[in-house]
Image (cartoon, rainbow, N blue to C red):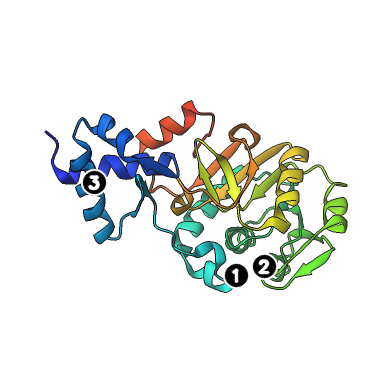
Amino acid sequence: MMLYAERAERIMQQLQLQSTVKVGELSRFLHVSVDTVRRDLKAMEQEGLIKYVHGGACLPDSMISFQNFTGREIVNSDLKREASRKALAYIKEGDVIALNSGTTNTVLSQELITLDKKMTVVTNNYAAINVLMQSSYIHLIAVGGEMDPLERSTYGTTCEQEFSQYFPDIAFLSINAVNYEDGFTDFRFHEIGVIQLLAKTAKRSIAVMDSSKLGKCSKRKVLSRTQVDTVVMDDHVSDEIREKYRKRGILLR
């Protein structure tokens, strides 16, 4: 019989795949009794690993979703930077790149200005615009619309109409959560139309996400598993988890 530490590791792996797990499912998966699963979940909750809910468990709600922009910039900033640096490898000289709003794309902008490559960047992300203006290599196009001061970005009909005039080589998408059952989800209702538009118009759509967003489910579905070509993520994801996502149509790089 597996030790608690092994069972806890397996439970965490399942939660990286789907936003919630049921006690009965875990009992069958781990080949242990329901009582054992419940004890494990309570112990894991005390350790801060999970949130124990009626009939199962989910990853703890860090409240990142509803913190302000500055607060989210700080959370997991090292992981966001690691993912952003990996994303640079996809950019070619002369590319037209679209960025939506979000803290990860603001970090990505800080990495973009280190590239000595000419490119055009189209974005509604005004926090990113402040950074991108520092580069003489980047032709910068700011998309207008209604301003969301909390997200430091524009949104709405004008914003989406302006974005629709471009067919980017790459759309780097900052999205709040992904799991292999629900696909890509977000809490920023104003931003959903922008994300969906960019995923459709870009030659290649790449979600840049830190690994804390894996296995999570946010407030509203944004994109299905197949509407994003690649997810660029930091390296804190096991090969086993990557393979399970690949089989469900989500390519984690």
Going from N to C along the chain, the mark reached first, 2 or 1, is: 1
Left or right? Give the position of 170 relative to 51.
Answer: right
- Helix, strand or loop at mark 2: loop
Q: Position of residue 221 (x, y in %)?
A: 62, 44
Kind of residue at badge 3: Arg
Kind of residue at badge 1: Phe
Q: Position of residue 131 (x, y in %)?
A: 67, 69
Which disc is residue 38 wearing?
Answer: 3
Label 3: few (<14), some or many (≥20) within 10 Å? some
Q: Quadrant of the N terminus?
A: top left
- Helix, strand or loop at mark 3: helix
Choose top left, top right, bottom left or bottom right for residue 33: top left
**Residue shown at 42%/31% (left/top)?**
244
Q: Nearer the viewer, residue 134 or 233?
A: 233
- Helix, strand or loop at mark 1: helix
Going from N to C along the chain, the mark reached first, 1 or 3, is: 3
**Residue shown at 24%/46% (left/top)?**
38
| C-alpha gap between disc 3 and disc 2 | 39 Å
Label 1: few (<14), some or many (≥20) within 10 Å? some
Q: Nearer the viewer, residue 84 or 23?
A: 23
Q: Nearer the viewer, residue 95 or 155?
A: 155
Left or right? Give the position of 211 relative to 37.
Answer: right
Which disc is residue 151 wearing?
Answer: 2
Identify the residue position indicated by label 1 in the image.
Answer: 69
**Looking at the image, do the residues carrying marks 2 and 1 touch, with CB atoms under 8 Å apart?**
yes
Looking at the rendered structure, the number of numbered marks drawn on it comes to 3
